[in-house]
Image: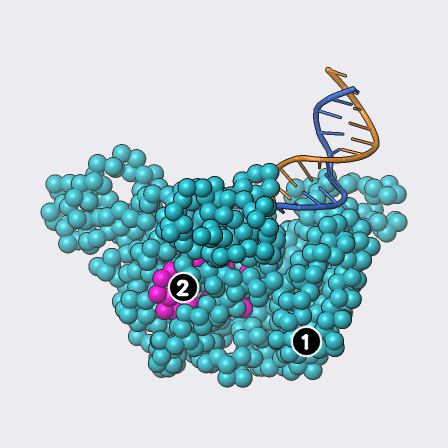
Chain colours: A cyan, B orange, C blue
Amino acid sequence: MNSPILRLALPAPVFGLFDYLPPAGLDPALLQPGQRLMVPFGPSERCGLLVEIGTDSEIPGSRLKAARVLLDEQPLLDKTQMDFLRWAAAYYHHPQGEVLMSALPVRLRKGKALLKPRPDHVFLLQEPDEVADALKKRAPRQYEILCWLRDKGGSARLEDFRRQFPSGRSILNALRLRGCVDLGIGEAVPGVLQTPAHELEPEQQAALDAVTANLDEYGAFLLDGVTGSGKTEVYFHIAEQVLARGRSVLLLVPEISLTPQLVRRVARRLAVRVAVMHSGLSDGEREQAWQLARSGEARMVLGTRSAVFASLPDLGLVLVDEEHDASYKQQEGFRYSARDMALVRASRAACPVVLGSATPSLESLRNAMDGRYGWLRLTRRAGGARAPRMQVLDVRNQRLAAGLSPVVLQALEQTLARGEQALVFLNRRGYAPVLSCYGCGWLSDCPRCDARQTLHLGQGKLICHHCGNERIQPKTCPSCGSSEIHPLGQGTEQLEETLKQRFPEYPLVRIDRDAASRKGTLERLLARVKEGGAGLLVGTQMLAKGHHFPNLTLVVMVDVDSGLFSADFRSAERMAQLIVQVAGRAGRAELPGRVLLQTRFPDHPLLRSLVEEDYNAFARRALKEREMAGLPPCSSQALIRASARSLEIAEGFLEQAAELAGRSADGRVAVWGPVPAPMRKRAGRHRAQLLLQTGQRPELQRLLDLLVPALSSLPDAGRVRWSVDVDPVDLY
DNA sequence: AGCACGCCGACT
DNA sequence: GTCGGCGTGCTC
């Protein structure tokens, strides 16, 4: 009888699978898809994943090698999971070996054995009060630990426990024997400390009913709820029902910085064991979380983008919080959208998926309008809070101080004088985006990019925000020697300086990547602001998410024009989302917020619909514009990028690609380019791109199915770095 | 992606 | 005379 052929996925940028013979002396009956094997690969050895077992191979028998050793008794990924990953690889036209292997924790990818589960958390099993009387006198240390745990919300990292109680081991053991605490992996809170559910408002109840009407079928929902309308509470109620049926829940969030608070909230509210997955974990922690989810021990996975590929049995609900957030799209390598994959995953698992946002993406809104998603709207803010009032400020012909108009300065002064806080938002860190010579026109060009180096006055450096290239800030013009070199434009560092001079009696906190670079700094800065009292906040993007400042009543957006006029057709959408999200940081019931938007285009129709009506009105108008221009979401795009030593090589490669595409597309898909990328040079590499666009989605897939495999065999393929981006979200 | 092979400059 | 620079080509 012929030996079976093993088809393996290997971490290599090759599209197909690799065929091997079974390891010598191994009973082939022990082999199952989803197991890992070590195999000889070229001159070295690699860990691969068994995907299929076949009977024959297209590779001549003389070239077939035998796998060396089987690593797992049981499959690491089940069939459902592998099928989903392979589907995703095909959809994004990315090598399936890389996609499948990237669903495994790094250690397993490298062929290491599964880690033995090691507890990393301590959980409280009883309220300290219940045992207080018995313990308080007799065992004060045990009592102390119980109280500490309670204050931490019922669970704590073992690491934190050891730091807090360096010699607490024996005491902890005593508590375990007493049944007061337990050790385990991942976050969890026992029922005793469960936070009771909030009563739902009618709108929330309606949303809950819509989703839970059919929990055993695929159904997509857009939870379109204004800031403060209680989307999270709706998630919890749905999750509660799904968990009660013994099925598991996947909750995706955009940022790591949001997870610690949310994990606590989830654990307290649902009393479920949660596996947390995000990029801030060590390899070991990540694998523990992965095992916790895969084994079904954690019925809930809470994680960022990559968690959409987590293994968890009996998936019964997928939640995508802040679904519009750009971080759901991976911007390199395997360029998937976790939001889109969440929908596919739910559909394959036959369960509901809920996309939540106060500022939904135009993609999702369109799906909701067309009836493909259930559209669940929450329009009421909790506690009767009112929406912040937005106002456009025309800054044409105004004397600006560091980019701030007199009206803004006056508003800041009044706000501070009332003992309230104001936030000045500018999405540009550093002192100024350019340093320029008045004598000869020299600009602080980055030597490696088609961009200017930003002046960071505090560090005395010019830094490129695209490649990190930096140099000491010159005192005279490097080109003509003139000492008349001056910054152009503003960044947050300059705003901070100006506002400190202007309002020296008030505290000012600047929050951006430079100010909050070290771990924990951000939390410290934010905590300072939340204490209240008059003060100024200056910051970027970082301020837009998650945090609410109750004493904040004024928000100033220094520059919204950059979002209104940009090469990227999505920039207005992103700016509108940013404005609404930042505005959402301000105000409370008795102190409504005010938002001032500085612009030189006060009559811009999109800006006006956002300010005079609301985000929804803005979105409808923006969608109409997209429709007329034939742009996504009213059409589908794929972008083929190429970079090389010279622009000619990159463009030459894409020229060949364009020709191939043109021939196969036969007019059903538009082929635009090749053109130089908007930033034609980055980190020393010259970049060009080719855009494919069509109103008929299946045509795009059909074209890519033909085109992408052919690209690897183009004569110039070896000289360029190229990639395919299906559904690109920014064209850089 | 690794990792080898291969063909040209500054070093013990 | 070598060590090593990274261009280019392949991996069942």
Q: Which residue is mark 2?
A: A250
Q: Amino acid at mark 2?
A: Leu
Above or below residue A662? Residue A148 is above
Q: Residue at x 70, y 52 (%)?
A: A721
* Foreground: disc 1 or disc 2: 1
Q: Which residue is mark 1?
A: A694
Above or below residue A581? Residue A712 is above
Per the image, label 1 sits on a secondary structure element best described as strand
Per the image, label 2 sits on a secondary structure element best described as strand
Relative depth, front residue between A579 and A209: A209
Q: Which residues are magenta?
A: A304-327
Q: Residue at x 40, y 59 (%)?
A: A78
Q: Is residue A499 left or right of residue A86?
A: right
User: In which quadrant of the rendered view does residue A173 lie?
Assistant: top left
Residue A70 forms part of the magenta stretch: no
Q: Residue at x 62, y 68 (%)?
A: A727
